[in-house]
Image (cartoon, helix red, strand yellow):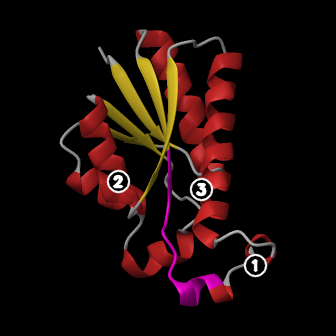
Amino acid sequence: MFHKILVAYDGSKGAERALDKAIEMARLTGAELVVLTVYRHHSMLEASLSMVRGAVERGRNLDSAMRDVAREAADFAKQRALTAGHDKVKAFIRTGQPARTIIATGREKGCDLIVVGSRGLGATEGYLLGSVSHKVTGLADCPVMVV
């Protein structure tokens, strides 16, 4: 049925549910699981207002700190799939606008299903601009499962 499933994972409760469902689907179908964590590039103004200011003050720039957090999230999700008994799993991090980056990565990796949580860490922005899951379902050219 499915050969390659992309799951967007940001560490939120919705992403946790999406990850669990994607692992289950991958195990049932024998599909490869592609975990993707997307982080945003931050401007100098955003960096000055950031909640990860401690890392920035210790000499690291905000993008580096965000990349490290994204890597930890992706690695956690990959380990969770491995622990659940699914050994065909790869994890990636990308920077960019989340919905478009999810879709572009799905195309690049040849995924035939995208699994996303209904609400992620950017929920406040979603109320104003539309949620990532809504954008992905509207723009993707493969099936999208919203969990």
Callout 1 amino acid? Arg
Whether residue 143 sits left or right of residue 101 in the image: it is left
Q: Check disc 2 and report the residue beneath it.
A: 101
Q: Position of residue 32 (x, y in %)?
A: 42, 18
Q: Check disc 3 and report the residue beneath it.
A: 67
Query: Can you tell which mark lies on residue 53?
Result: 1
Q: Quick check: 41 above or below 129?
A: above
Q: Looking at the image, which residue is at 57% across and 85% down? A: 46
Callout 2 amino acid? Thr
Callout 3 amino acid? Arg
Crowd rating for badge 3 (residues with CA inside 10 Å; few <14, some 14–19, many 20+): some
Q: Are marks 3 and 2 in contact (CB under 8 Å)?
A: no
Q: Name the foreground residue: 11 vs 123.
A: 11
Labels 2, 1: front one? 1
Does the segment drawn in magenta span residue 43? yes
Secondary element type, mark 1? helix
Q: Looking at the image, which residue is at 47% across and 21% down? A: 25
Secondary element type, mark 3? helix
Q: CA distance from mark 3 to mark 2?
A: 15 Å
Labels 3, 2: front one? 3
Q: Position of residue 12 (x, y in %)?
A: 64, 54
Q: Which residues are magenta?
A: 37-47
Does the segment drawn in magenta span residue 17? no
Residue found farthest to the left: 141
Q: Quick check: 76 above or below 132?
A: above
Q: CA distance from mark 3 to mark 1?
A: 14 Å
Q: Looking at the image, which residue is at 18% across and 42% down? A: 141
Q: Quick check: 17 above or below 133?
A: above
Closer to the N terminus: mark 2 or mark 1? 1
Q: Position of residue 33 (x, y in %)?
A: 46, 24
Crowd rating for badge 1 (residues with CA inside 10 Å; few <14, some 14–19, many 20+): some
